[in-house]
Image (cartoon, helix red, strand yellow):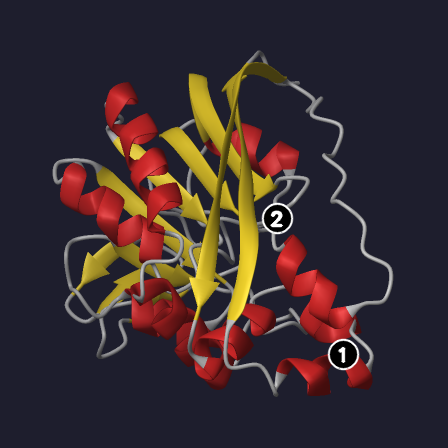
Amino acid sequence: MLQCPKCKKPLQKDGNRYCCDNHHSFDIAKRGYVNLGLGNHRQTGDDKDMVRSRTAFLQHGYYQPLCDMLTNICKQKQPLMLIDAGCGEGFYTNQIKRVLPKCNIFGFDLSKYAVGEASKPHNGVFYAVCSVFHMPLSNTCADIVLSVFAPFDTKEVCRVLQKDGWFIKVGPGPRHLYGLKEHLYDNVYENKIEDNRILNMELVDEKDLSYEITIDDQKDIWALFQMTPYFWKTPKKGSEHLKTLSSLTTDVEFHIEIYRKKACE
């Protein structure tokens, strides 16, 4: 199931490391995760401060309804193996594991800080630092691939999914964080839902979840801002204004697409 990212041979646990027949070796970190990245990616994922802020924000329950919905969707499908591709700090992954304790769950993310945070519970989830575009797994091994606000590669998802496996993708709905954007920009537009046609995947179901949140903590307001792409492209005027807020009310809206794998080329 696990395969070496360098030569694609099977990986086996050997004490405090994973090895393949070609003698490639990957040490297990103190927190229990493994770095299985190829080592040639310039991007390193979220830094320590961003992971710390997002962890605190999520632990305060603002996105718990989404987690509950995803957990129920996965539970209904009774998977034997699930991949959280772009797992971040494991907020969704670890709660799914509590509901599906017998499921073999893998969490992959490019940020070693996020994966280190995700690994803290030591709950049996296999966490690895790696790109979701090159997952260190054999072909057709997973029942579900989950992608929550994360980039993905259709061919790679299709490769690791079993026949009739499920791909669950979560993205922003039209009015997601509309109230936040009103404080950042003079002209505010609703988000566009992307074309939901994915090669070799059949769209089986779509779900929308929307509600309003009020954040009365400046640290949480800033943490939410850091979690969004607006953090990188907002003019200084908008971000400085956000720092003055002691309270923020905004819509949150999630669009969930559930696909089933068809025959892949």
**Foreground: 165 or 19?**
165
Residue 15, quarter of the rendered image: bottom left
* Vertical comparison of 189 with 174: above or below: below
Residue 28 rendering spot, x and y as whole percentages = 26, 71
Residue 108, quarter of the rendered image: bottom left
Q: How many numbered tags mark residues here?
A: 2
User: Is any atom of residue 80 visible in this view?
Assistant: yes
Q: Amino acid at mark 2?
A: His
| Separation of residues labelled 2 and 1 (CA atoms) | 18 Å
* Vertical comparison of 48 with 37: above or below: below
Q: Is residue 100 left or right of residue 261?
A: left
Label whose residue precedes the other's in the sequence (2 or 1):
2
**Foreground: 37 or 213?**
213
Residue 159 rendering spot, x and y as whole percentages = 54, 31
Residue 146, quarter of the rendered image: top left
Q: Is residue 104 left or right of residue 265?
A: left
* Vertical comparison of 53 with 177: above or below: below
| Tag 2 secondary structure | loop
Residue at image location 49% in from the left, 56% down from the top? 5
* Vertical comparison of 209 with 22: above or below: above
Q: Which residue is mark 1?
A: 238
Quarter of the N terminus within the rendering:
top left
Quarter of the C terminus within the rendering:
top right
Q: Which residue is mark 2?
A: 176
Residue 218 rendering spot, x and y as whole percentages = 48, 82
Q: Amino acid at mark 1?
A: Gly
Say the numbered circle drawn on residue 67: none
Residue at image location 61% in from the left, 86% down from the top? 243
